[in-house]
């Protein structure tokens, strides 16, 4: 059983979620959640995969300049992906959910 304080907190979370993204809240209620609207990881993943392929080809060709640029692009894609994950999991707003690394 949940205490009254826990129920109030859950009601508060529900109202905040419904105000921020009604489609996501409806999906949670229907047990069929959709990703939040601001969860746009696919372009970042595509950029990372493309950059990794460029890095692989540049490595096989032995082109150091392209390898360096591709490596920097890959690092940027990883950092951006980490930012997307942090934002979608509210890590940047709530200190309890921040990773320890």
Image: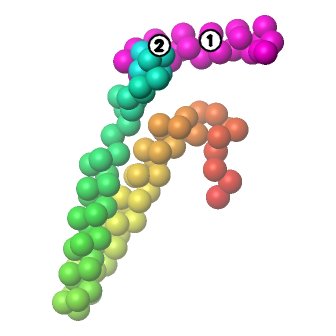
Using residue 97 as the reference point, say whether residue 50 is left or right of it.
Answer: left
Residue 32 appears at what percent x and percent y? 41, 25
- The quadrant holding residue 49 is bottom left
Q: Which mark is residue 69?
A: none
Compared to residue 27, the image places residue 3 above or below, namely above
Residue 13 appears at what percent x and percent y? 60, 17
Compared to residue 22, the image places residue 84 above or below, namely below
Residue 88 appears at what percent x and percent y? 47, 37
Compared to residue 2, the image places residue 82 above or below, namely below
Q: Which mark is residue 18?
A: 2
Using residue 37 as the reference point, say whether residue 91 is left or right of it.
Answer: right
- The quadrant holding residue 23 is top left
Q: Quadrant of the N terminus?
A: top right
Q: Nearer the viewer, residue 70 or 81?
A: 81
- The quadrant holding residue 53 is bottom left
Q: Residues within 10 Å of mark 2 (few under 14, many from 20)?
A: some
The magenta region covers: 1-24
- Secondary structure at badge 1 equals helix
Q: What residue sits 65% from the left and 40% below the top?
A: 97
Q: What residue sits 19% from the left and 90% below the top?
A: 61
Magenta span: predominant SS is: helix
Q: Dot 1 corresponds to which residue?
A: 12
- Secondary structure at badge 2 equals helix
Q: Tell me which numbered mark, 2 or 1, is placed earlier along the sequence.
A: 1
Residue 7 falls within the magenta-colored stretch? yes
Residue 74 appears at what percent x and percent y? 34, 66
Callout count: 2
Q: What residue sits 71% from the left and 11% below the top?
A: 7
């Amino acid at each position: 059983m949940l205490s009254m304080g826990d129920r109030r907190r859950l009601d508060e979370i529900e109202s905040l979620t419904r105000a921020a993204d009604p489609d996501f809240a409806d999906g949670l209620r229907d047990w069929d959640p959709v990703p939040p609207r601001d969860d746009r990881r696919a372009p970042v993943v595509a950029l990372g995969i493309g950059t990794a392929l460029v890095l692989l080809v540049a490595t096989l060709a032995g082109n150091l300049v392209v390898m360096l640029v591709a490596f920097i692009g890959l690092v940027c894609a990883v950092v951006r992906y980490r930012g997307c994950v942090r934002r979608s999991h509210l890590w940047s707003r709530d200190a309890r959910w921040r990773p320890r690394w």
